[in-house]
């Protein structure tokens, strides 16, 4: 199914409202991720986020994993956050809270 920007969406996305749901959840994620002074920039599209830090990301990825949040690096100083499209608002808020804890 074509979109306004020339891309395509699956029939599932069009029928289930997935696109608007992802936009709502992305707003939850983006509002708090840049609060830490260790964060240089937060970039993302939909629910795929890169959090660029002023220092190496590996120790923060380890700390997040120890708290049950699966994240990875995307370069030496970037934490990658890519939750599934079916993530709930509560799960996303918990993920943002965990990242806030490890970046504090």
Image (cartoon, helix red, strand yellow):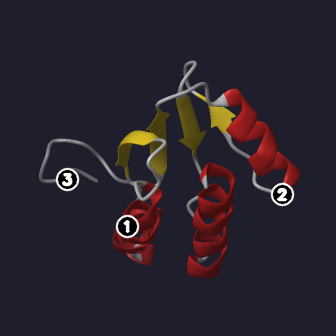
| Residue that carries the numbered disc 3 in the rendered image | 3
Q: Quadrant of the C terminus?
A: bottom right
Q: Quadrant of residue 69?
A: bottom right
Indicate which disc, 2 or 3, sits on the residue closer to the N terminus: 3
| Element assignment for label 3 | loop
Residue 3: image x %, image y %?
Answer: 19, 53
| Residue that carries the numbered disc 1 in the rendered image | 31
| Residue that carries the numbered disc 2 in the rendered image | 68
Q: CA distance from mark 2 to mark 1?
A: 21 Å
Is residue 24 in view?
yes
Query: Is 33 left or right of 95, judged from the image as shown?
Result: left
Q: CA distance from mark 3 to mark 1?
A: 27 Å
Q: Residue at x 72, y 39 (%)?
A: 61
Query: Is 82 left or right of 7, judged from the image as shown?
Result: right
| Element assignment for label 2 | loop
Indicate which disc, 2 or 1, sits on the residue closer to the N terminus: 1
Q: Nearer the viewer, mark 3 or mark 1?
A: 1
Given contact means CB atoms under 8 Å apart, are the residues at marks 2 and 1 in contact? no
């Amino acid at each position: 199914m074509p979109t306004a920007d020339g891309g395509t969406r699956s029939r599932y996305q069009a029928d289930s409202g997935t696109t608007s749901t992802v936009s709502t959840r992305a707003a939850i994620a983006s509002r708090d991720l840049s609060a830490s002074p260790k964060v240089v920039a937060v970039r993302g599209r939909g629910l795929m986020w890169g959090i660029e830090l002023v220092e190496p990301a590996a120790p923060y990825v380890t700390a997040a994993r120890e708290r049950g949040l699966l994240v990875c690096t995307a370069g030496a100083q970037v934490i990658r956050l890519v939750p599934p499209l079916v993530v709930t608002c509560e799960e996303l808020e918990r993920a943002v809270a965990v990242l806030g804890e490890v970046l504090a």
